[in-house]
Image (cartoon, rainbow, N blue to C red):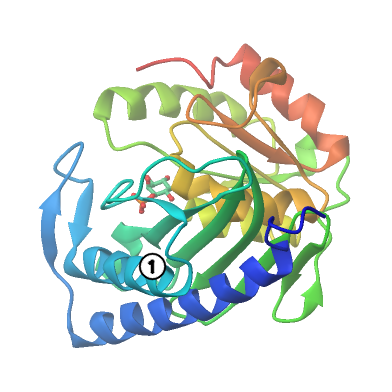
Amino acid sequence: MDRTRPAPQDLLEIAVDVARDAAATAYRMRAEGVSVAATKSTVTDVVTAADRAVERQVLDALRRLRPDDAVLGEEYGAGETGPVGPGGVRWIIDPIDGTVNYLYGLPHSAVSLAAEVDGKVVAGVVRNVSTGEEWTATAGGGAWRDGARLRCSTETDLGQALVATGFGYDPRRRAHQARVIAELITQVRDIRRLGAAALDLCLAAEGRVDAYYEKGLAAWDLAAGGLVAAEAGLRVSGLGGLPAGPDLVIAAPPALFAPLHDRLAVLDASGGP
Ligand code: LIP
């Protein structure tokens, strides 16, 4: 390994320490009471004071620990950091994924923190704020939850698959997504809409859902959970061989990927507003 290139395990250890402290702050602020601080893309796309405080805490910790690294966070973007050079590290932060769940006190929100080197996520942690469940992965090092190695579902029949998904905030996009799911729901075991992409990807990594797809994810929704899912044996991709990204993320076990992909392509799951 390049001597100047940080080891993924070293980056993961930093990510875990920072994410644990961040999740503790989110948990405390939730107990103290949470309200909407602002809205973003629509009136239902909310930001709480905790989202901002947690991301600020993560940014300060990373600047202290690795001052030359770049960052990309949901609330503060790239901050004051510039682009990273070859071999440089960029941290990708979702301070609270599942913000609406967090606002309502539903136990399905998470701190998601990933380290990316040369455009590839090499380490990631997702920590459920309410339950303390913690998923981790390094590129080539496997996916783990609380010390147990994860393997994805072995389901081979799409009609028997429990499929997680999510919806955007824009009513026009939601209408298109509803049309897609109105068809898909008749062709799978059932659908779960749990409200936090990072956690949905981690649940797929351990077979607590068989597969996941969603249109509209940002880099911070996908980075850590996508590595956990891939390291647990799921294929994580977009449509037609494109990489997973805002147009569509599909995370499915090898036997389910093609049938789910093809069904989503026919239903135009990556289309619409
Ligand atoms: C959430 C995603 C989720 C999606 C929600 C929301 P946020 O991110 O994690 O998959 O369905 O609509 O976008 O806004 O809580 O960070």
Is residue 263 in view? yes
49 lies above or below 2: below
Q: Choose top left, top right, bottom left or bottom right for residue 95.
A: bottom left
Q: Choose top left, top right, bottom left or bottom right for residue 31.
A: bottom left
Q: Amino acid at mark 1?
A: Arg
> Residue 223 location in percent, x, y?
56, 49
Q: Is mark 1 within 8 Å of ligand 1?
A: no
Is residue 209 in view? no
Q: Residue at x 18, y 74 (%)?
A: 34
92 lies above or below 259: below
Which quadrant holds the N terminus?
A: bottom right
Which quadrant holds the C terminus?
A: top left
> Residue 229 location in percent, x, y?
71, 52
Q: Residue at x 48, y 67 (%)?
A: 66
55 lies above or below 195: below
> Residue 259 location in percent, x, y?
79, 26
| Mark 1 residue element | helix
Using the image as rendered, state which of residue 18 and residue 102 is in the foreground: 18
> Residue 267 location in percent, x, y?
58, 16
Which residue is labeled 1 in the image?
Answer: 63
Q: Residue at x 64, y 16 (%)?
A: 265
Q: Residue at x 49, y 43 (%)?
A: 84
